[in-house]
Amino acid sequence: MLHELPNKYHGVPFVPVGEEGYNNYLILNAAEKIQKNILEREKARKKSKKERDKLRKQYLASFGSVSINGSHSISQTKKPYNKFWPIDYGWEIDYYW
């Protein structure tokens, strides 16, 4: 029975005995997990950016200048200059007298 314990717990990380040792183990383990998570997220972010760029490149190759939401790009026209006074000036203005 006692000789089977090392085989049973093979691969399980060693946890130090005592409150201080256990707390230090948790802190180090948490820091290691956080760092590993940061690296995994960065890797996933790079992969998704690569896929987005690939899809964007395919879209532009097939549709050209049509925007992604389906409408053509329309340039805004300038509002023409009003050479007359505004109507709401306060009284009626006869423009051609």
Image: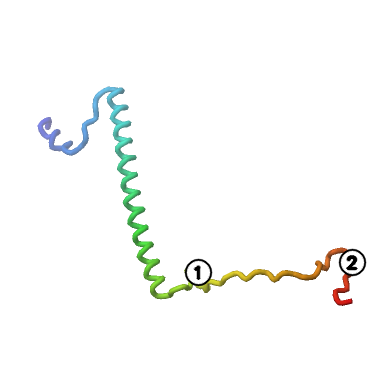
Q: Which residue is mark 1?
A: 69
Q: Quadrant of the C terminus?
A: bottom right
Q: Earlier in the sequence, mark 2 or mark 1?
A: 1
Residue 35 in percent (x, y) is at 32, 40
Amino acid type for the residue under numbered disc 2: Trp
Left or right of 73 on screen, residue 87: right
Q: Secondary structure at mark 2?
A: loop
Callout 1: 10 Å neighbours few (<14), some, many (20+)?
Answer: few
Q: Residue furthest left?
A: 3
Residue 33 in percent (x, y) is at 31, 40
Nearer-the-camera pick, 91 or 6? 91
Name the residue: 85% across, 74% down.
Answer: 95
Q: Secondary structure at mark 1?
A: loop
Name the residue: 89% across, 70% down.
Answer: 92
Task: Please state the total of marks drawn on the protein image.
Answer: 2
Name the residue: 77% across, 70% down.
Answer: 83
Q: Which mark is residue 45?
A: none
Q: Residue furthest bottom?
A: 96
Residue contact between numbered discs 2 and 1, judged by CB atoms under 8 Å = no
Residue 59 in percent (x, y) is at 40, 71
Q: Which residue is mark 2?
A: 91
Left or right of 21 on screen, residue 85: right
| Front: mark 2 or 1 | 2
Residue 94 in percent (x, y) is at 88, 73
Nearer-the-camera pick, 94 or 14? 94
Nearer-the-camera pick, 1 or 75? 75
Left or right of 63 on screen, residue 95: right
Amino acid type for the residue under numbered disc 1: Asn
Nearer-the-camera pick, 66 or 14? 66
Q: Residue furthest front?
A: 97
